[in-house]
């Protein structure tokens, strides 16, 4: 089991951890990971591990068996030994852009209130695939609505509900292709806004900014037809 340090503080850039295992493929498992693992359309973090005078570049992180997170070295050589304490340093600029894009995509699902069939996140842009038979008539109006929401400077917070509570509120789940992880008995929700001023509330395991003001202005890009019922909408950070 790997402690999810990125979940405790999405703004932490450095943390210590101890190597608990090395996989057959040369992946590194720590007792606590600052690196977010690829999931939910959000890429795994990159960065470096440091110990003594040594360091190794981490290309990405992925989920392993159970609750393990595996750090994938850029070069599978010079690995730290099991039991070694290491200092983790993530590529903060890349992570922060992922946080901004991810939070903006949540708001995109508000201005386009249709079921989501897929999505992905990159440092400069993201996209959501909607169950949308016809393209929007006015993309500019959608973009204006989205930027107005962002400019409301809403706080972004997390809360937890039980799996039974989620089953009783199926409308909270917007993504048709990815269901919230189950088995632990509780589901993490991301709330944008407060109380009656909530703009969005949905299950999500990713990293987000603390306030929508951090997203900045966004631009809607191409809207592509991806099937009879699907439209792919791109969002770009300005």
Image (spheres, rainbow, N blue to C red):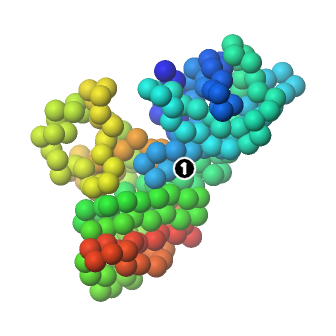
Q: Residue 158: image x %, image y %? A: 36, 39
Is residue 8 rendered to the left or right of residue 94? left
Which residue is farthest left? 168
Q: Residue 116: image x %, image y %? A: 30, 61
Q: Residue 226: image x %, image y %? A: 37, 74
Which residue is farthest front? 24
Which residue is farthest top? 83
Q: Is residue 180 above or below residue 70?
A: below
Q: Quick one: quadrant of the C terminus?
A: bottom right
Q: Quick one: 157 or 43, which is closer to the camera?
A: 43
Residue 111, by quadrant, is bottom left
Residue 137, by quadrant, is bottom left
Residue at the disc numbered 1? 43
Q: Quick one: 82 or 213, which is closer to the camera?
A: 82
The residue that appears at 28% across and 77% down in the rendered structure is 228
Q: Residue 179: image x %, image y %? A: 30, 46
Q: Secondary structure at mark 1?
A: loop
Q: Quick one: 172 or 117, which is closer to the camera?
A: 117
The residue that appears at 59% across and 48% down in the rendered structure is 95
Mark yes or no: residue 222 visible.
yes
The residue that appears at 51% across and 27% down in the rendered structure is 68
Mark 1 surroundings within 10 Å by alpha-carbon count, few (fewer than 14), some (14 through 19), many (20 or more): many
Q: Is residue 115 above or below residue 68?
A: below
Residue 97, by quadrant, is bottom right
Which residue is farthest bottom? 137
């Amino acid at each position: 089991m790997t402690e999810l340090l990125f979940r405790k503080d999405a703004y932490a850039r450095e943390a210590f951890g101890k190597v608990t295992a090395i996989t057959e493929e040369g992946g590194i498992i720590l007792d606590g990971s600052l690196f977010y693992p690829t999931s939910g359309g959000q890429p795994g973090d990159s960065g470096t591990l440091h110990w003594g005078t040594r360091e190794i570049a981490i290309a990405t992180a992925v989920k392993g068996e159970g609750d393990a997170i595996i750090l994938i070295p850029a070069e599978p050589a010079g690995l730290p030994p099991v039991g070694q304490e290491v200092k983790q340093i993530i590529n903060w600029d890349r992570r922060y852009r992922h946080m901004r894009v991810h939070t903006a995509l949540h708001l995109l699902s508000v201005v386009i209130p249709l079921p989501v069939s897929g999505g992905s996140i990159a440092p400069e842009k993201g996209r959501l695939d909607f169950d949308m038979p016809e393209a929007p008539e006015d993309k500019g109006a959608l973009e204006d609505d989205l930027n107005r929401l962002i400019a409301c400077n809403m706080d972004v917070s997390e809360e937890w509900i039980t799996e039974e509570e989620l089953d009783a509120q199926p409308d909270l789940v917007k993504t048709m292709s990815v269901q919230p992880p189950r088995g632990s008995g509780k589901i993490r929700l991301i709330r944008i806004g407060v109380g009656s001023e909530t703009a969005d509330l949905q299950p999500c395991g990713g990293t987000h900014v603390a306030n929508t003001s951090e997203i900045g202005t966004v631009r809607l890009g191409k809207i592509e037809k991806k099937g009879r019922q699907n439209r792919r909408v791109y969002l770009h950070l300005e």
